[in-house]
Amino acid sequence: MHSPTEANACAEELRSALAAHGITLPSLGVDLPTFAARCPTRPLIALGNCNLLTAQALTAALRKGAA
């Protein structure tokens, strides 16, 4: 089971990696309802919404990284 600390660290690492490509997802963070569940669950990282330009930049970064 992953801890909230690990989930926060993962979200921050992702935020940093995206920032290295000039990409910001303002809603990126730990999915808080995950921690409110009655049964222990694996934490989820919420990517949130982004505008078209951000989605295009993310797509380009992923394609460049896959090449």
Image (tube, helix red, strand yellow):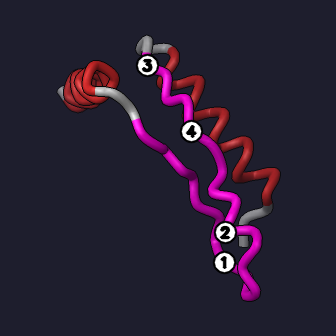
Q: Residue at x 56, y 37 (%)?
A: 27
Q: Which residue is mark 2?
A: 34
Which mark sits nearer the N-terminus, 2 or 4?
A: 4
Image marks 1 and 3: residues in contact by CB distance under 8 Å:
no
Name the spot of residue 44 as percent of width and height, x first.
Answer: 58, 60
Q: Residue at x 79, y 57 (%)?
A: 4
> Separation of disc 2 and disc 3 at Cα?
25 Å
> Residue flagged by tag 1: what amino acid is it?
Thr
Point out the tag, 1 or 3, that comes first from the N-terminus: 3
Query: In this picture, is 27 found above or below 65?
Result: below
Callout 4 amino acid: Leu
Q: Quadrant of the C terminus?
A: top left
Q: CA distance from mark 2 to mark 4?
A: 14 Å
Instruction: Report if the CB atoms under discs 1 and 2 are less than 8 Å apart.
Output: yes
Q: Residues within 10 Å of mark 1 (few under 14, many from 20)?
A: few
In the rendered structure, which segment of residues is drawn in magenta?
23-49
